[in-house]
Amino acid sequence: MAIREDFSAFHTVCPESSMLTVEQLLRMPSVLVGRPQVFATPDELLRTIGWAHILENFEAAEFLRGNELVLTTAIGWDEDPDFERYAASMAQLNVAALVLELSERLPAVPQGLVDACNNFALPLIVMHRPVAFVEITEAIHQWLFAQQTQRVKAGREITEHFTKSMHQGTPTDAILMDCARMLSSTVLLEDSGYNIQNYASVDILPRNYFEQWQHRSRASHNSGNSDRHAVPIRMHGKLFGSLICPKEAAHPAGVEHVLTMAATAIGADLLRRPESRLWSLGTGRGLLEDLQSGMESNLEFVHGQLEAAGLPIEDSVLHGFAIRLAGGSDFQLAANELESKLRPLANCLIGVIRAPHPKLFGIFSYRHDLRGSFDLAQLRKIRSAACFDGALYLGPAARGLAQGQNSMNQAVAACDLGLNSRDELVHAADYPLALLAHELRHEPTLQRLPQEQLSGILALDTRHRIEFLRVLEAYLASPTNRSQAASLSHLSRSVFYQRLTALEQLLEADLNDARTLTILTLSLLVYRQSHQEAS
């Protein structure tokens, strides 16, 4: 009894992405035995083969689905074949290559076929000796199934790895690095505003890698990310951003599967964080810390990274800033508080330094054409938050990252020194000598300066040394107004004047001489920064 049933839905599904190329096919023993002659460009040999099919007639569209390797002996060809139509139909189906076995019936390859295949960029492989097509198809199919098996196994390993990462609470930085190693590539974490928030790479990136990132990434997203791999990071209906890597990345489990599992693990990590700006201390913090410590000297590269992270540098005014944290304050919550106050005024990146005093620091920027409307006095109220202790220290206005780096370092130095911490807003540039002493504090020549210039005071016992240093400090703070200096020293004017006379004798110096005052100011600054005696 005949069974009538529609079997059209039941067909073999080939792997979507094969690891077998036409070039690899030509190395197979079952192919080499036919002494193959190849008509193709090197780029055409990189085409991948998804299946193999023996086709003896000209009606390719009826028997092919695309990406096949077509094998033929030409036994079903007409006396005068239309090679242009034949090659065009195969090219339209994206056939990987055409294999033609020569025989007594067709002892030489027709020039018309060679020309047609060349016109439609269809690789043509001519076998000059008989080959067993069954051995070629068997080898190809075994290869494809082996790759599919390997893909399934590798996919299971990737799933297990990132599932374990979620269970262990692995941080985003570590997940990114794992992903980059698996793909042997660069992996970038981007927020929904096309700003790079973090990245990991196994390669040294070119200097212009992050140049115009937001513009280029937006264009890629709008075009369907055809030029790269991009997977959204979405958890519980919340879109955090995208995980991105170059098109050239590869993995047996498939790049999309690796990125998807990594994105899921990163999403789980981000959901565990209660902060509103989940990545504000990510890559930006690392870059700021490297800039502040001098570990990153390639400013051109960092320029692109900072702009990609959402901090405009070009055509912008930059200010470095720093502010101490109150005891017991959580730096992430404090960063959120600081950012909430800065964001309405300017773009910013915030980092944290834990020693010698816990502090937040960073750079904020605003466009130069808005400078007239930007009032730095608006920053005065920042210190009022309970998580901060002391003034907000501000570096000088800067153009370009090199100046911005210097502005940030000045703000951090002023914050470390606690200069005029009673004020709400302190401009570091108002204290050039203090900053110079701080910058050069480890220079041997400068370290010897207090011992040479203040030797008369330093030779006294502790009580008198502390008192005379306080008097000198008060006088140097107001050398043209001795009454004000006496008030700063908390001494009566008569006692203060007596101490000044004694100071001149101890130091063997004229306290009315401007050069002497400059040297003494620098000496005292160096001494204060290297000795923590109570004043």
Image (cartoon, rainbow, N blue to C red):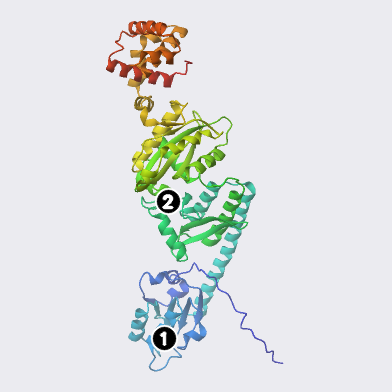
Q: Is 511 rendered above or below residue 368?
A: above
Which quadrant holds the N terminus? bottom right
**Image check: 323 left or right of 10?**
left
**Image check: 137 left or right of 374?**
right
Query: For the residue marked with disc 2, what is the amino acid?
Result: Ala
Q: Which residue is label 2 attached to?
A: 308
Comparing labels 2 and 1, the label whose residue is closer to the camera: 2
Q: Is 57 rendered above or below residue 517?
A: below
- Check disc 2: other Cα within 10 Å, few if <14, some if 14-19, many if 20+: many
Query: For the residue marked with disc 1, what is the amino acid?
Result: Tyr
Element class at badge 1: helix
Element class at badge 2: helix
- Asked if the residues shown at circle 2 and circle 1 are in contact, with their CB atoms under 8 angstroms apart, the answer is no
Which residue occupies the foreground of this view, 97 or 184?
184
Q: Which residue is label 1 attached to?
A: 86
Q: Is 353 rendered above or below residue 273?
A: above
Q: Earlier in the sequence, mark 2 or mark 1?
A: 1
Residue in the image at 31% along x and 19% along y = 518
Picture coordinates of residue 521, whole percent (x, y)? 35, 19
Picture coordinates of residue 423, whole percent (x, y)? 46, 28
Visible residue check, residue 510: yes
Residue in the image at 59% along x and 31% along y = 328
Instruction: Give the alpha-carbon distance from disc 2 to disc 1, as whole Å.
Output: 50 Å
Picture coordinates of residue 346, whole percent (x, y)? 44, 45
Picture coordinates of residue 264, whole percent (x, y)? 59, 55
